[in-house]
Image (cartoon, rainbow, N blue to C red):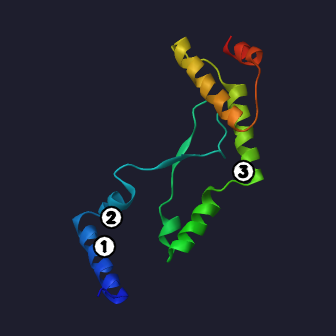
Amino acid sequence: MFSTENFDDWKIRMQANLDVQDDDMRYVITDGPMKILKENTAVSITDGAPYRIEKPRDKIKMCKTGKEIWEKLIQMYEENEQTKENKLSVAVQKFDNIKMKAGEFMHDYDERISCIVNELNAFGKVYSNKEVALKVI
């Protein structure tokens, strides 16, 4: 039978083996070869494009049990009223500040506006067709 002590030894040896191959090999296996980015809603957005930052790796790494991981994930991603209000404010700001970029095709501009309007709808903020049409014009 496989004991916890044997598993811990195996885990340490496996991590050391991966670290010898490449400093980031363990992260490539656990997180994938790409950096995972998240939208930073604390930054003011002027051109309508979201500002993205890398998600931290170490938040879950410190957890020792599945229950701790679950609670940390709930804490990180479950939205409270303040978070929802902040996201709504950022989405409204995006809509208010969106402008057509130099050399941008109308189709692309319309697509960006549609994405923002869909985001606003998800938060319960609905603009009339007239308001959206005026924004496009």
* Mark 3 vs mark 2, CA separation in Å: 33 Å
Q: Is residue 106 above or below residue 41?
A: above
Q: Amino acid at mark 1?
A: Gln
Compared across the picture, whether 17 is left or right of 47 comes to left
Q: Which residue is mark 1?
A: 15
Compared across the picture, whether 21 is left or right of 76 comes to left
Compared across the picture, whether 107 is left or right of 43 comes to left
Residue 101 is at least partly visible in this image: no
Q: Which residue is mark 3?
A: 83
Q: Residue at x 28, y 80 (%)?
A: 10
Q: Residue furthest front?
A: 1
Q: Is residue 25 above or below residue 13?
A: above
Crowd rating for badge 2 (residues with CA inside 10 Å; few <14, some 14–19, many 20+): some
Local secondary structure at mark 3: helix
Q: Which residue is mark 2?
A: 26
**Labels 2 & 1 near each other (Cβ < 8 A):** yes
